Image: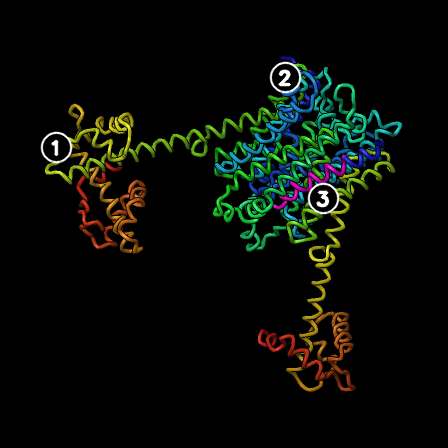
Amino acid sequence: MSPTLVILLVGSLVAASCALVGSFLVLRKLALLGDAISHSVLPGIAIAFFLTGDRAPLPMVLGAGALGVLTVFLVELFHRSRRLKEDAAIGVVFPALFSLGVILISRYAAQVDLDLDCVLYGEIAYTPWDLVFWGSRSFGPKALWVTGGVLALNALFVATFYKELKISTFDPELAGSLGFSPTLLHYALMTAVSLTVVGSFESVGAILVVAMLVVPPATAFLLTDRLSRMLILAVALGIVSAISGYWLARWWDCSIAGAMAVVAGTLFVLALTLSPRYGLLGRLLTHRRLRERLAGQLVLLHLQQGEARLPVTLLERRFGWSRGRFQRTLRRLARAGWIEKGRDGLRLTTAGADFLDSTGGSHLAHRL
Amino acid sequence: MELSFTARNVMLGAALLGVAGGAMGSFTLLRRQSLLGDALSHAALPGICFAFLLTGSKAPLPLFAGALIAGLLGALTMLATVRWSRVKEDSAMGIVLSVFFGLGIVLLTYIQKLPTGNQSGLDKFLFGQAATLVEEDVQVMALLSVGVLALLALFYKELKILAFDREYGASLGLPMRSLEILLTLLLVVVVVVGLQTVGVVLLVATLITPAAAARQWTDRLGVMILLSAAIGAGSGVLGALVSATVPRLPTGPVIVLFASFVLVVSLFLAPRRGYLWALARERRVERRIRRENLLKDLYRVGEGGESWDRFVSLPQLMGLRGQSSARLLRSARPLLQDGLMQRQGDTVRLTDKGRREAAGVVRKHRLWELYLTRRLELPSDHVHRDAEAMEHALTDEAVTELDALLGHPELDPHGRPIPPVVAGAAGEEATA
């Protein structure tokens, strides 16, 4: 397999598995829990390393997974007992565990092959050369197996418990009354997040995992209201970010993970501005259309209520709008054929009167 | 102990960060923006890289300025995203954190490939290397910290309203949005002050951990800020000292662990909020409930029999609630000690004093049952369980009111007499 293909595949697998669980994190307003877990697992990795003496993946994943679940447990404990708010609980737990990990490593493992850079800033560029061996036969890059396994687990989890996850995310009380425990599901989801974080960041680095957990799901959240579509979109956006990020990094000769995060961020900004329903531009246009419509209605109404013909200057003085806004409104109304401009002033046409009735103009008149 | 020049710089830096971070953190904690510090510390990285690319120097001032600008940009991006779209605050923070940091990593790798880049040492900002603090750094840090503290003090009243009741502030005509931006700006400054000492990842702890610990001890913002700043400064100085004396012990993590230790102690020991206090309170309530239940059981046996003077056997009492003899004896001991109960072999009976107190409990139970059936029109066979809980919670004033409300009734819904108020019973109740 060519190195490029391996990197693209690993990036896409990480993107997909992060998007699946990340969507639920975003919907549950726990977007930063992924970041917290990716740091708090450090002592678990360190302890696994001391116990086994090498960097075998399985003990490390287990150690890290245990710490991930511990993080969630502690956050829930402080939060549920109302001593700390949820965000504060996250904010005190992960730095404490991370500090413990850093101290363990710098005290006892400084000379050996375990340093922060390779744990936290795993480099996706090296994945093609880190191979799995069974006896003397090579079975391809390790990262492919690990990230592929994580994706399979996540897909299985989300597919099996799709309905339960959906209900407990949007309506935890309903979930409880339907007879399955939202707490248990919460822990299951967080275990999946821990596994995803741990399985991915050793190959691609923590920052890419955090980005992929939050950014594509948040982008998808701006594009749809349906959970199923959000999941599919998030996966697709993640994969697009991974692939174009890789080429960007080749072009700029810089960190691949960083470039993937930057592309994901760019896609988010695009969705934020251009999303048809929730984008800034769309909302700005809708807002303007509504304003124009109201302005037109007000002028029509005024013509209907008032004298038969009104001089433009008088009307302009009465409304007190800026000249540009007033003239634009009149031009629009004239173009629609709702008013006529005669020599002695403005007049409502029958079409204009009909329009006013059809849009609830009389209702508006009440309120004026 | 003689401190080296470097160690003194580190200690000063850590103390400054502790005070500024602790004070600032109180506000972010109360505003539920604890993780904003985390997002902003990550967002500062591309600014540092840009500053280096533009000036080619590692002088603190341009790097501080770059970090400040990038952090501010990150904060404004976050605020604008939340204000103008449906994206929630936590997602917005996550996006700013990861995308800005990703950009920072891109620039960092780009710089490292430049001929001059290898020695740039910019990565000390990632994990923090307090030992690289020079006097010039500390001077800039001091200037910024004093500025932050002065502004916090100057706008204390307004920021307090912002932290507790934004709408109220807006109704007073205070510029809440500008205050919010001011507070965020100050947060960015504190973040920049701390980056070199503790690094990107741990920065959030210097803000939140002291504040969370201080929160356990007090409900007053002013006290909380002072306490938080003291905890921050204390753990900063201790951390710097310890890491200077013990080899291979990085400063940032040690500072954070000291602060976390104070937090754990506070969570357990702080009066009223501490876990141990809550546990003791729970135990006290449980003891009272057991005591009142036993009194009530004896009363009911007594009122059913011919005479109050008859002794009741312990097995009969055990049967009433299906409890073990050990448990029953544990509840009985304080009653015997207080002279509310007499024991004769394996039998017990209430004393006069005990009967008065027991009557009070039964009175509460039966009045509540009557209230539920009359006022809430619940069927009389549904009210016992609720009354079992309420009899321990009703205060004497509530009982008097209940009695008047129901027209001083004599019988409960099951036709049993409601014991009248006995002189002295209320007094006994209060000491129970």
* Both labels 1 and 3 in a single chain: no
Q: Which of the pair A360/B307 is nearer the observer? A: B307
Amino acid beneath label 3: Val
Reading the image, the residue beneath label 2 is: A51
A237 relative to B191, above or below: below
Callout 1: residue from which chain? B
Reading the image, the residue beneath label 1 is: B310
Q: CA distance from mark 1 to mark 3?
A: 78 Å
What's the magenta region?
A10-27
Who's the residue at 57% across and 29% down the image? A70
In the rendered image, residue A11 lying in the magenta stretch gets the answer yes
Give the image quarter of residue A239: top right
Is disc 3 surrounded by few (<14), some (14 to 19) or many (20+) residues within 10 Å? Answer: many
Q: CA distance from mark 3 to mark 2?
A: 37 Å
- Disc 2 versus disc 1: nearer the observer: 2
Amino acid beneath label 1: Arg
Give the overall secondary structure of the magenta segment: helix
Q: CA distance from mark 2 to mark 1?
A: 69 Å
* Both labels 3 and 2 in a single chain: yes
Q: Are marks 2 and 1 in contact (CB under 8 Å)?
A: no
Number of labels in the image equals 3
Mark 3 or mark 2: name the one nearer the start of the chain: 2
B313 sits left or right of A297 in the view: left
Give the image quarter of residue A111: top right
Callout 3: residue from which chain? A
Give the image quarter of residue A333: bottom right
